[in-house]
Image (cartoon, rainbow, N blue to C red):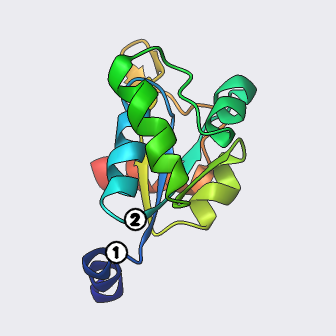
Amino acid sequence: MAGLLEKIKNKTATVCVVGVGYVGLPNVVLFAEKGYKVIAADTSERVVSELSKGRSHIFDPELNISVPKAFATGRISASRDVNDASKRSDVILISVPTPAEHGEPKKAAWLPEKIFSWRTARSA
């Protein structure tokens, strides 16, 4: 844990944001603006394609300005491979809708098993 805290303090930690929608995309921008390397991971081909071109896929006046600026720093990459992106990261922020069945959390099929297992173990 001390190594991770040092990486965060020195801004050498890689942050993976899984789910780059209305919640995730602003976080991608903010982490990059603060100096962190960020992987924007999303299963949508359209989302990753737009982000890879440095464009916001969400119509929002602020994001339409901040996303291209943040991508211009070179600190952001976009990926559809959530599993690989999470493996290459020190910190993982999951910002996706939580699937539920009968009021109980249900694993999203595309979430890496390691992430879901850790979250489940921590909440038990």
Above-or-below relation of 5 to 69: below
Above or below residue 123? Residue 86 is below
Can residue 120 be seen? no
- For image coordinates 67% across by 35% down, the residue present is 48
Residue 11: which disc?
1
Query: Tag count in the figure?
Result: 2
Q: Is 7 on the left-hand or right-hand side of 40? A: left
In front of the other: 10 or 101: 10
What is the spatial separation of the Cα atoms under label 1 and label 2, in whole angstroms?
5 Å
Where on the picture, by quarter, is residue 88?
bottom right
Q: Earlier in the sequence, mark 1 or mark 2?
A: 1
Marks 1,2: beta carbons within 8 A: yes
Task: Look at the numbered disc 2 and give the secondary structure of its residue.
Answer: loop
Residue at 30 percent across and 60 percent down: it is: 34
Q: Amino acid at mark 2?
A: Tyr
- The disc label shown at residue 36, or none: 2
Coordinates of residue 20 in the picture (x, y in percent): 50, 33
Image x and y of residue 47, in percent: 64, 28
**Disc 2 packing (10 Å; few <14; some 14–19; many ≥20):** many
Q: Is residue 73 left or right of residue 2?
A: right
Quadrant containing the N terminus in the rendered view: bottom left
Find numbered disc 1 in the image and state the secondary structure of the residue it sits on.
loop
- At label 1, the amino acid type is Lys
Quick one: label 1, few (<14), some, or many (20+) residues within 10 Å? some
